[in-house]
Amino acid sequence: MHSSIHIKLDNDEAVNLKKNMLLLERDLLESVKFIRNYEALRKKEFLLKSKVKRDLVMVHALINSAELDLPKEEHEFEHEAKEYTHEAEGKELSKIKKSRIIEHKKSDIERQIDEIREKLSRLGVQE
C-alpha cells in the first residue's frame, strides 16, 4: 500500500524548499562532473607515467650502449698501476705509471692552470 502524506506549506516555505532542492541537485551534478574529471586525469596520468617509464628505459639503454663505446675509465688504470706496485722489480715502473695516471686525472683546465702557475713562477711572480 502506498499512501500519500500532504503537508500544508506557505508560499515562502515552498519556494525555499524548491530552492534548496535545486541547490542540492546542482551540487550533486558538480560532484559527478569532478569525479569524471578526476577519472580522466588519472587515465592521463597513467598514460604519461607509462610514456616516461618507456623513455627512461630507452635512455638507460642508450647510456649503456654509449658506455660500451667509451674508453676505459681512469680508475681501471689505477688498478693496473697498483698491480705493478706488488712486483719487486717493477717498483720504479709503477711509480712512473702512477704519476702518469695522476696527471691523466687532471682536467684540461687544471693542466692549463698548472702551466700558467709554472710560467708565473718562472717570471718570479708570486700568487
Image (tube, grey):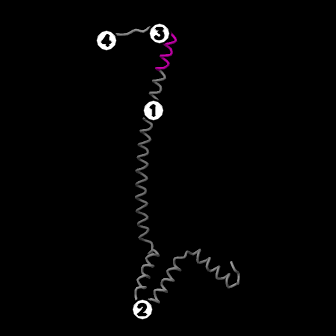
Choose the circle earlier in sequence order: 3 or 1: 3
Spot occupied by residue 65 in the image (x, y as percentages of width and height): 41, 67
Query: Relative to 113, does residue 23 appear above or below in the rendering?
Result: above
Whether pointer 2 and pointer 4 mark residues with C-beta atoms closer than 8 Å, the reply is no
Marking on residue 9? 3
Please state which of residues 85 and 56 is positioned toward the viewer in this rendering: 85
Whether pointer 1 and pointer 4 mark residues with C-beta atoms closer than 8 Å, the reply is no
Assign the magenta stretch its main secondary structure.
Answer: helix
Say if the magenta span includes residue 12. yes
Marking on residue 2? 4
- The local crowd at label 1, few if under 14, some if 14 to 19, many if 20 or more residues have their Cα within 10 Å, is few
> Label 4 is placed on what type of residue?
His
In the rendered image, which quarter is residue 125 located in?
A: bottom right
Q: CA distance from mark 3 to mark 2?
A: 113 Å
Q: Nearer the viewer, mark 2 or mark 4?
A: 2
Please state which of residues 6 and 48 is positioned toward the viewer in this rendering: 6
Spot occupied by residue 75 in the image (x, y as percentages of width and height): 45, 75
Please state which of residues 107 and 93 is positioned toward the viewer in this rendering: 93
User: Which region of the structure is painted magenta?
Assistant: 9-21
Q: Nearer the viewer, mark 1 or mark 4?
A: 4
In which quadrant will I find the N terminus? top left
Whether pointer 3 and pointer 2 mark residues with C-beta atoms closer than 8 Å, the reply is no
Choose the circle earlier in sequence order: 4 or 3: 4
Marking on residue 33? 1
Q: CA distance from mark 1 to mark 4?
A: 35 Å
- The local crowd at label 4, few if under 14, some if 14 to 19, many if 20 or more residues have their Cα within 10 Å, is few
* Residue annotated with mark 2: 89
Q: Nearer the viewer, mark 2 or mark 1?
A: 2
